[in-house]
Image: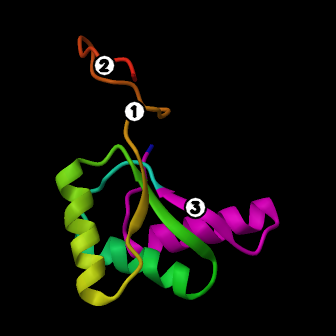
């Protein structure tokens, strides 16, 4: 079950990953499913806090609508925060809706 992208969830999940993996930073920290119940500013700010603390080097998003990614990047730019720099839309543990045909990569 997805936990969402609130600041406490992001922070706790990152800390848990660092602890479980026995590492001091995460190269790319991913937001795998967008969460429209949380203000985008909170989510982007939470990722930025992890980067500023040196716990995360860069931030990525998968399975987010392109317009939400652009909105998040604009928000990050306006605050001087770290933007999403990695995007993954096609390959994921998520499955498309039944009946939706995906184009093959060229």
CB atoms of marks 2 and 1 within 8 Å:
yes
In the rendered image, is residue 75 in sight?
yes
Question: Which residue position is annotated with label 2?
Answer: 102
Circle 1 SS class: loop
The Cα atoms of the two marked residues, 1 and 3, are separated by: 18 Å
Circle 2 SS class: loop
Note whether 94 is above or below 24 in the view shown: above
Q: For this view, does 94 lie left or right of residue 67?
A: right
What crowding class fits label 2: few (fewer than 14 Cα within 10 Å), some (14-19), or many (20 or more)? few
Specify which label sits upstream in the sequence, 1 or 3. 3
Specify which label sits upstream in the sequence, 2 or 1. 1
Note whether 88 is above or below 48 in the view shown: above
User: Residue at left 59%, top 87%?
Assistant: 53
- Residue toward you, 4 or 50: 50
In the rendered image, is residue 36 in sight?
no
Q: Position of residue 92 (x, y in %)?
A: 47, 34
Question: Which residue position is annotated with label 3?
Answer: 28
**Which residue sits furthest right?**
22
Note whether 45 is above or below 62 in the view shown: below
User: Residue at left 17%, top 54%?
Assistant: 67
Question: Which residue position is annotated with label 1?
Answer: 90
Q: Position of residue 47 (x, y in %)?
A: 45, 74
The Cα atoms of the two marked residues, 3 and 2, are separated by: 26 Å
Specify which label sits upstream in the sequence, 3 or 2. 3
Circle 3 SS class: strand
Q: Is residue 7 magenta?
A: yes
Magenta span covers which residues? 2-30
């Amino acid at each position: 079950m997805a936990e969402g992208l609130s600041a406490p969830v992001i922070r706790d999940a990152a800390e848990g990953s660092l602890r479980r993996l026995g590492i001091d930073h995460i190269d790319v920290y991913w937001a795998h499913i967008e969460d429209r119940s949380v203000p985008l500013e909170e989510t982007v700010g939470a990722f930025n806090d992890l980067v500023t603390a040196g716990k995360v080097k860069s931030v990525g998003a998968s399975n987010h609508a392109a317009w939400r990614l652009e909105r998040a990047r604009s928000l990050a730019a306006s605050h001087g925060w770290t933007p999403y720099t990695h995007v993954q839309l096609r390959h994921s543990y998520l499955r498309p809706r039944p009946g939706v045909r995906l184009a093959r990569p060229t």
